[in-house]
Amino acid sequence: MIRPIKYLLNILRPIPVLHVAYDVGDKHKQTIVLLHGIAATSTTWEILINQLGPDKYRIVALDLLGFGQSPKPKSMDYTVDDHIKSVHKTLENLRIKKPFIIIGHSMGAIVAVHYYTIYPKGIKHMYLLSPPIYIADDDSQTIFSRTRTDLYLDAYKFISEQKKFTINNSQLLRKLLSIKDGIDVNEDNWESFRLSLMNTTVKQDTYDEISKAKIPVSIIYGSIDEFLIPESVDKLAEYRHVTVKKLLAVDHIVGKRFAKEVARLITKT
């Protein structure tokens, strides 16, 4: 697309409002905003919502741009900026009481961190679950970590270029693993998945943004997470405002044990 035309589209096209899957609890209580991962929906949060209890909080869960019941505009590049603009507009429409807690899972963690970077006022605490943090060209990484990072990034590029392969295998994995939410790539969300993967997950500054945050950041991940580089995440514990919690024998999905620990940390805080 010619640059001037693309620039005009960016100015003139409206920012989509997201589907609000959950808005439960007392609007005068502490608000918690939940952002799911790529190729998933707000169904991700059902267990955690039950663990937290809407009697204690106002809990808001959105379907991210291009996924679930949210709009899937073909004019979007699905960059992290595109995602946070829609999140911000939706939260403004809901008149969210500030300061609120933001929780992101997987790609939703990347969106949550960038949301705070652009709109820092009003967020009191970030909880990042299974964050796929990839550090590009960092000389401080071990050879093992660098190799593993390159492997993931090459795999994501391949996946984004192989539509039929990716859709077929995502559906096969869902059946084999009996996954209720996540890894759901289909004809309807293919473009939003492909572009989000490359423009939000692969092209990211999440590590630097977390390191510069001025609020508490809690990172929780499983020891057998299939999409995570532990060394890249653990390095963030060097910063005073960041805590990192590893859950043994837990994978990428927010299951019962994962949700229970997140709820416990939030209640404790």
Image (tube, helix red, strand yellow):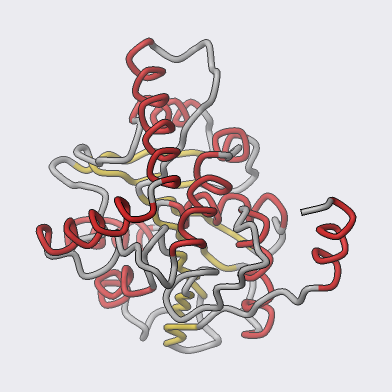
Q: Is residue 210 above or below residue 178?
A: above
Q: Position of residue 263 (x, y in %)?
A: 31, 63
Quadrant of the rendered structure where residue 222 is?
Answer: top left
Q: Residue at x 61, y 69 (%)?
A: 74
Residue 121 to residue 202: above or below: below
- The quadrant the C terminus occupies is bottom left
Q: Nearer the viewer, residue 57 or 187?
A: 187
In the rendered structure, the answer to whether residue 22 lies left or right of residue 262 reads right
From the image, which quarter does the N terminus lie in?
bottom right
* Position of residue 267 measured from the top left corner of the image (x, y, whole percent): 36, 64
Residue placed at 41% from the left, 31% from the top?
Answer: 154
Foreground residue, 160 or 10?
Answer: 160
Left or right: where 4 falls relative to 18: right
Of 263 and 102, nearer the camera is 102
Question: Quick check: 7 left or right of 185?
Answer: right
- How many numbered dots are placed on residues in this image? 0
The quarter holding residue 16 reads bottom right
Q: Position of residue 246 (x, y in %)?
A: 27, 39
Q: State the residue at coordinates (71%, 59%).
A: 119
Q: In which image quadrant can residue 262 be found? A: bottom left
Q: Is residue 17 above or below residue 186?
A: below
x and y percentages locating residue 100 in the rendered image:
57, 68
Instruction: Relative to 135, say whether 161 is above or below.
Output: below
